[in-house]
Image (spheres, helix red, strand yellow):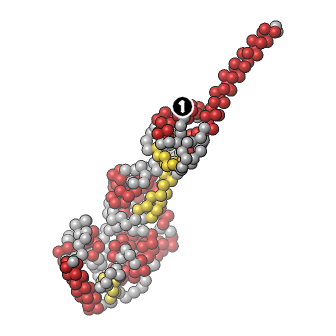
Amino acid sequence: MSKRNKVVAIIITVIVFISIVAPKAMLFISGNNKSCNTKVKEFFILSKIDLDSLALCLKKNGIIDNPSSFISLGEYKKLSNKNIALGKYIIEPGTTYRTLLNGFSQNSNGNGNAEVEVPVTFNNCRDINEMAGNVSKHILADSTKIVSYIQNSKILRKYKFTLDEVPTMFLPNTYNFFYDTDEKEFVERMANEYKNFWTNERKLKIKKIGLKSSLEVVTLASIVYSEQSINSDEWPIIAGLYLNRIAKGIRLQSDPTFKFCWGNELKGVQRLLNKHRDIDCKYNTYKIDGLPPGPICLTSAKVIDAVLNRVKVDYIFMCAKPDYSYRHNFAVTGAEHMKNARIFQNWLANELKKKNKR
């Protein structure tokens, strides 16, 4: 080979080498570019997004300053709106573009590799509408869609609940979910939590306390909690009292049950009257025998366990104490109860007079 041909061959080799190595070198450099945020940032991908739009969002949020390098590396990694995962992400200062892109990539579970879970808490909820409203503040699932899904006849049949019974399945607590959780995933998770809660040990206690099903236990627990939401040490006592009434065939006559029938109309009403108690409603335990068809609020595991571990008492009656302790005077006889009730009513009337004078 002539000297000239050797030079040409070397030049061609160098050009080929550069054409192969240079892009990879640029990608290596792009991959090592770092995020420009100086503090930890939360970043949400709320809907399907392409690579260009993702880069612009990151720049707008002060996370990257070189969108073109980010896009080039993303294209090399074949990221698109098909595999960029929705969700919540925590971006540490100085995170490389390579790490960012790997984190946004959807894994085999459908989540982003770096997607973080968010705590979802629902407590003191009257019904599934209120619960869905709380939950939808933390995950992508819309509250209306959650409620519609729960109330769908196919879903009710799947989980073997009626419309009245289905609130039983939702145990108030704090749970971790991915931000992009939809209504189906949320309900499936809650169904599993409910199933796992009812261990064999708990199931054995149901008959021991004189009830027939977990539904009855949760329904009674909802009444117990509605009667006493502050002093938890009274829960097993109140449960024992109501179980006595059930065993003796005495109507529960629980004020929270007829208040439930009125919805929000009695909110803030301090003095409940006979006309309030006289409402015809399948939840009103002044009108029906035994327990209502379902819970009157969403009830936590602690209250359910208090019912399962009720205290054996002789009490049949209870009345609020004439003070602001939010505790009760319990009674065995009707005469004793009437005495307690008169004392409380007199105290309440005096308190209302004092309030009106102010």
Q: Position of residue 101 (x, y in %)?
A: 56, 40
Rendered position, 218 above or below 48: below
Kind of residue indicated by mark 1: Ser
| Residue at the image point whose x is 46% and y is 62% from the top | 174
Rendered position, 290 above or below 262: below
Element under disc 1? helix
**Residue 4 horizontal side relative to residue 169, left or right:** right
| Residue at the image point whose x is 52% and y is 42% from the top | 63
The picture quadrant where one finds residue 156 is: bottom left
Task: Report the residue marked by disc 1.
Answer: 68
Quarter that holds the C terminus: bottom left
Tell me the crowding category of disc 1: few under 14, some 14 to 19, or many 20 or more residues within 10 angstroms, Cα based.
few
Q: Position of residue 343 (x, y in %)?
A: 26, 88
Does residue 198 appear anywhere in the picture?
A: yes
Rendered position, 48 above or below 203: above
Q: Nearer the viewer, residue 216 or 343?
A: 343
Q: Position of residue 189 (x, y in %)?
A: 46, 57
The picture quadrant where one finds residue 220 is: bottom left
Q: Position of residue 335 (x, y in %)?
A: 26, 92
| Residue at the image point whose x is 28% and y is 88% from the top | 340
Does residue 81 appear anywhere in the picture?
A: no
Report how many numbered discs are placed on residues in the image: 1
| Residue at the image point whose x is 45% and y is 69% from the top | 301
Quarter that holds the N terminus: top right
| Residue at the limit of the structure toward the left, as seen here | 275
